[in-house]
């Protein structure tokens, strides 16, 4: 059933509102990565001299250029981890556009949402963002001990966090905070599984740029399916 929710979301990528949010999200994500990369390059240029004297070898030139090239590939790798908080931030900013688009197409009989205000949504997004960044920073110290299971650990941790965030923010539009938390507790396994389905493509550069949109849409379907079943 979760896969069905995801496939419905995937099938709506051609929706104009989906395309708009996706393009804005891609632009903001690339701008963020470019800014981080520019700061990193500036640090290299500022701290690393053009010539380094090595024992028994003598002066070596071009070290800063080598680090510049190496840093590009490093940033590609770091983008996997950076996209998790970026996806979290995009969720709150563009949540309503995506959810309304899904509900207009698949659930047209629903009354207008009267849940959380934009201020509450942004506040929750900031709180989730801080949590995700903090947990992922701590997880960096655990990954060396995970060995070949690092991707599984990454997916499990971020699947839990993203599932918690996506479901709560979507549910708050339709039910109160108390009921949203209660639904999340009752369906924690399904929510975690759906979150993991979203976290897995976050580790694929470029593909991860559309995950925030697919995540919100998938959890919109998941919420309405659970609500209809009284779960």
Image (tube, rainbow, N blue to C red):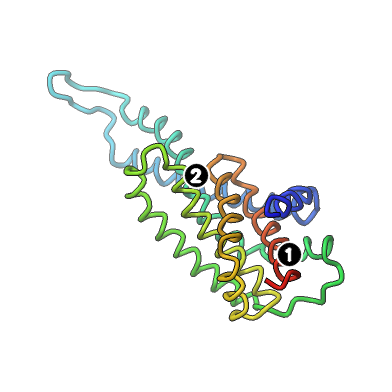
Q: Is 180 drawn above or below residue 141 in the view shown?
A: below
- Relative to 65, 207 lies left or right: right
In front: 64, or 176? Answer: 176
User: Which quarter shows the C terminus?
Assistant: bottom right
Element on which disc 1 rests:
helix
79 on left or right of 134: right
Residue lying at the far left of the rendered structure: 56
**Helix, strand or loop at disc 2?**
helix
Which class describes the residues within 10 Å of circle 1: few (<14), some (14-19), or many (20+)? some
In front: label 1 or label 2: 1
Q: Which mark is residue 27?
A: none
Q: Is residue 6 left or right of residue 36?
A: right
Instruction: Name the residue rendered at 36%, 39% in the picture.
Output: 147
Precedes in sequence: disc 1 or disc 2: 2
Q: Residue at x 56, y 60 (%)?
A: 189
Q: Using the rendered view, name the quadrant where residue 170 is placed.
A: bottom right
- Which corner quadrant holds the N terminus? bottom right
Quarter of the rendering containing residue 64:
top left
Most extreme residue toward the right, as rendered?
109
Viewed as shown, does residue 73 lie left or right of 31?
A: left
Provide the residue designation for mark 1.
Answer: 225
Residue under the image location 45 percent in, 65 percent down = 130
Q: Which residue is mark 2?
A: 80
Crowding near pointer 2: few (<14 within 10 Å), some, many (20+)?
Answer: some
User: Where residue 47 sits in the image (x, y, percent)?
Assistant: 28, 41
Q: CA distance from mark 1 to mark 2?
A: 31 Å
Image position of 134 with respect to 185: above or below: above
Residues at marks 1 and 2 touching, judged by CB atoms closer than 8 Å: no
Query: Which percent across, then down, holds residue 126?
Result: 51, 68
On the image, the x and y values in percent for residue 129 come to 49, 63
- In the rendered image, the vertical position of residue 69 relative to residue 170, given as above or below: above
């Amino acid at each position: 059933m979760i896969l069905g929710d995801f496939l419905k979301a995937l099938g709506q990528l051609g929706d104009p509102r989906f395309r708009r949010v996706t393009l804005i999200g891609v632009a903001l994500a690339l701008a963020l990565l470019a800014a981080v990369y520019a700061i990193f390059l500036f640090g290299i240029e500022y701290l690393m001299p053009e010539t380094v004297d090595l024992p028994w070898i003598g002066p070596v030139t071009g070290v800063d250029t080598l680090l510049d090239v190496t840093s590009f590939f490093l940033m590609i790798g770091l983008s996997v981890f950076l996209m998790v908080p970026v996806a979290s931030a995009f969720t709150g900013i563009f949540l309503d556009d995506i959810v309304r688009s899904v509900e207009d197409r698949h659930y047209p009989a629903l009354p207008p949402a009267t849940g959380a205000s934009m201020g509450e949504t942004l506040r929750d997004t900031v709180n989730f963002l801080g949590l995700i960044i903090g947990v992922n920073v701590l997880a960096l110290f655990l990954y060396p001990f995970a060995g070949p299971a690092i991707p599984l650990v990454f997916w499990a941790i971020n699947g839990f966090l993203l599932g918690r965030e996506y479901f709560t923010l979507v549910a708050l539009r339709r039910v109160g905070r108390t009921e949203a938390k209660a639904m999340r507790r009752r369906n924690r396994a399904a929510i975690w599984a759906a979150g993991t389905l979203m976290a897995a493509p976050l580790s694929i550069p470029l593909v991860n740029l559309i995950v925030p949109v697919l995540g919100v849409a998938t959890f919109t379907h998941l919420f309405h399916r659970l609500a209809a079943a009284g779960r």
